[in-house]
């Protein structure tokens, strides 16, 4: 059994799989811990806010510029149609595989985004738009205490130069912070933009559990490979070397 990328706890509930043999995952989960009722500066520093507001002035000049949470089925479908057109292009530009390529994956995302939950939906879609185009969307799940990012992308137009993803993230953090949420994460990984907002790390672990004698060998191999990848990612020189090799032979 390869049980990867598990949290030690979810709110006050301990993960029972943490009792199995485990090791730190390749990547941690950057997390923003928020104090309910805390001032905006406790979530995002005033200096960072000023930089984002300066960038946003360029976007605010666009006709119909707005931030909103999609609530109607028509809005959700329209934003997802745009996402599934733009995201493959964005991923190809970054030389990343299109994880949404399988038809069942796209259908699952669409179904979850449209599925009702309480007064909203299973997945929240936040967007920056103007009259001419969708500028950025971030989507994730919110449970009343924590918001967890699931997928996002931003425009391929010239408006991308004004960091619309970071601006949208500020709106999202303030929205949930003002509603008493205690934490927010942008998904497992070490992307630079995540560190701009998330200063803490939630510990994430992997468990490789053999069920047979052959499984013991497989578990040892998977454990060693995972440990090696983690060492590379934690060493900037090794990570840069691995990235250059991947670009050369990819």
Image (cartoon, rainbow, N blue to C red):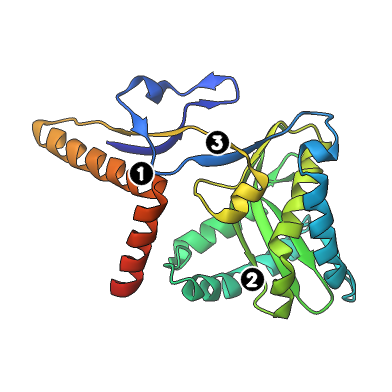
Q: Are marks 2 and 3 in contact (CB under 8 Å)?
A: no
Residue 87 position by quadrant: bottom right
Name which of mark 1 and mark 2 comes first in the sequence: 2
Q: Is residue 201 left or right of residue 240?
A: right
Q: Residues within 10 Å of mark 2 (few under 14, many from 20)?
A: few
Residue 114 percent location from the top left of the image = 66, 55
Measuring 13% from the left and 37% from the top, which residue is drawn there?
Answer: 217
Disc 1 target residue:
230
State the SS at label 1: helix
Residue 98 percent location from the top left of the image = 45, 68
Measuring 69% from the left and 61% from the top, which residue is drawn there?
Answer: 165
The one nearer the camera, 158 or 113, is 158
Q: CA distance from mark 1 to mark 2?
A: 36 Å
Numbered disc in front, either 1 or 2:
1
Measuring 78% from the left and 58% from the top, which residue is drawn there?
Answer: 72
Name which of mark 3 and mark 1 comes first in the sequence: 3
The correct choice, above or below, for 44 with respect to 181 in the image is below
Disc 3 target residue:
201
Disc 2 target residue:
81
Residue 11 position by quadrant: top right
State the SS at label 3: strand
């Amino acid at each position: 059994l390869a049980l990867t990328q598990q949290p030690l706890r979810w709110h006050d509930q301990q993960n029972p799989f943490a009792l199995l043999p485990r090791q730190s995952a390749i990547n941690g989960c950057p997390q923003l811990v928020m104090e309910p009722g805390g001032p905006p500066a406790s979530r995002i520093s005033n200096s960072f806010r000023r930089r984002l507001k300066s960038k946003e002035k360029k976007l605010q000049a666009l006709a119909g510029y707005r931030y909103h949470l999609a609530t109607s089925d028509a809005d959700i479908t329209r934003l997802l149609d745009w996402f599934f057109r733009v995201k493959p292009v964005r991923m190809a530009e970054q030389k990343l595989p299109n994880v949404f390529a399988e038809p069942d994956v796209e259908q699952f995302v669409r179904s979850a985004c449209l599925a009702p939950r309480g007064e909203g939906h299973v997945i929240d879609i936040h967007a920056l738009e103007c009259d001419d185009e969708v500028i950025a969307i971030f989507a994730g799940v919110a449970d009343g205490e924590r918001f967890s990012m699931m997928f996002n992308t931003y425009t391929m137009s010239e408006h991308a130069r004004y960091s619309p993803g970071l601006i949208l993230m500020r709106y999202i953090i303030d929205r949930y912070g003002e509603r008493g949420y205690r934490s927010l994460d942008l998904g497992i990984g070490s992307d630079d933009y995540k560190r701009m907002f998330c200063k803490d790390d939630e510990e994430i672990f992997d468990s490789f559990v053999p069920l047979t004698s052959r499984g013991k060998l497989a578990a040892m191999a998977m454990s060693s490979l995972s440990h090696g990848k983690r060492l590379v990612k934690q060493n900037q020189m090794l990570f840069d070397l691995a990235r250059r090799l991947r670009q050369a032979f990819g």
